[in-house]
Amino acid sequence: MEMPLVSIVTINYDHSEVTAELLKSLRNVTYPELEIIVVDNNSPNDDPEILSVSFPEIQLIRSDENLGFAGGNNLGIRKAKGKYILLLNNDTEVDPGFLEPLVAKLESDPTIGAVSPKIRFFSTPDTLQYAGFTPLNPYTIRSTGRGYGIRDTGQFEQDAPTAYLHGAAMMVPVEVIRKVGLLAECYFLYYEELDWSERIRNAGYRLLYIHNSLVFHKESISTGKMSPMKTYYMNRARLLYLRRNVTGLKFPVAVLYQLFIAIPKNALKFLFERNPGHFTAYRQAVLWHVKHLSAKNIHSDPTF
């Protein structure tokens, strides 16, 4: 197999110690041709220069502002020199041989537009987080993860089509990025990879889950597993995805479902659970769309 250059892009935000654990695991990777780009998203309480000192092999890019997941990764992609771009969350650690299967699959078939590895939870390393996604329901804007939360006993040991990539680890050829554009920066956090997957599939490419590439995910280090910040960005992004990707007669039905079922249900849930912080965050997420109802920039994608 040819060994084209792979550019690994990861984002650091106030957690250099977590990023350092990823970089340590990348030092054990067996694939020989790679560059590692760390984008610091203007960390307010962290000095990322320690990463350059401890890991001189990396390229550290310091952003002047917090660009979010999409903007930070786009900054790294623009600096990358590889044939393939691997976006890898800083709260992951990798199996030493995880890159070869991803590259081999993309090299074998130009109709494959992107791939994601098998992902297990770091805290319970025999438990699956990702072995592919089902298509999003156009009304609820939710999907189901294949294998999510169950013990990995070898039941997903074949490469398989997936509706969406996983944002924690996804490899895309530069040629594909040039055709479909970069990640949509209007999201800031969450749903960017689902939107990107949609655009890659609409361009005629296939997306695959790769069974023999393994990554371990610590999950939600920067935002918190159940924080109001996560509630805000997750729900804001869900409605953004609807506005950008649901079309035809499904669009008005989806809007009515959100207005009269999903939004009241979720708001009441936070109230009954006595979670005022989450209720406020959810309310702000919905109001963001009211304030930006006619915004045209949510339908634009940055180019590479």
Image (tube, rainbow, N blue to C red):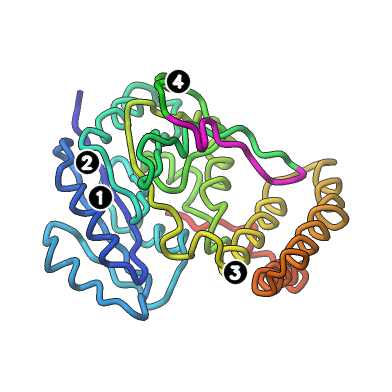
Q: Which residue is mark 1?
A: 81
Q: Amino acid at mark 4?
A: Gln
**Residue, x 19% and y 27% (percent of image)?**
2
Residue 5's label in the rendered image is 2
Upstream in the sequence, badge 3 or badge 4? 4
Contact, CB < 8 Å: mark 2 with mark 1? Answer: yes
The residue under label 1 is which amino acid type?
Lys
Residue 278 screen position, x and y as percent? 66, 69
Q: Residue furthest bottom?
A: 44
Q: Is residue 57 left or right of residue 118?
A: left
Labelled pair 3, 4 in contact (Cβ < 8 Å): no
Residue extending farthest to the front is 273
| Mark pair 2, 1: CA separation | 8 Å
Element at badge 4?
loop
* Secondary structure mostly taken by the magenta-highlighted segment of the chain: loop
The image shows a total of numbered marks equal to 4
Give whichever of discs 3 and 1 has the lower sequence position: 1
Cα distance between the residues tagged 2 and 3: 39 Å
Q: What residue range appears in magenta?
A: 139-151
User: At label 2, which amino acid type do we have?
Assistant: Leu
Evaluate if marks 2 and 3 touch, with contact meaning CB atoms under 8 Å apart.
Answer: no
Q: Which residue is mark 3?
A: 228
Provide the residue designation for mark 4. Answer: 155
Q: Is residue 12 above or below residue 254?
A: below
Q: CA distance from mark 2 to mark 4?
A: 32 Å
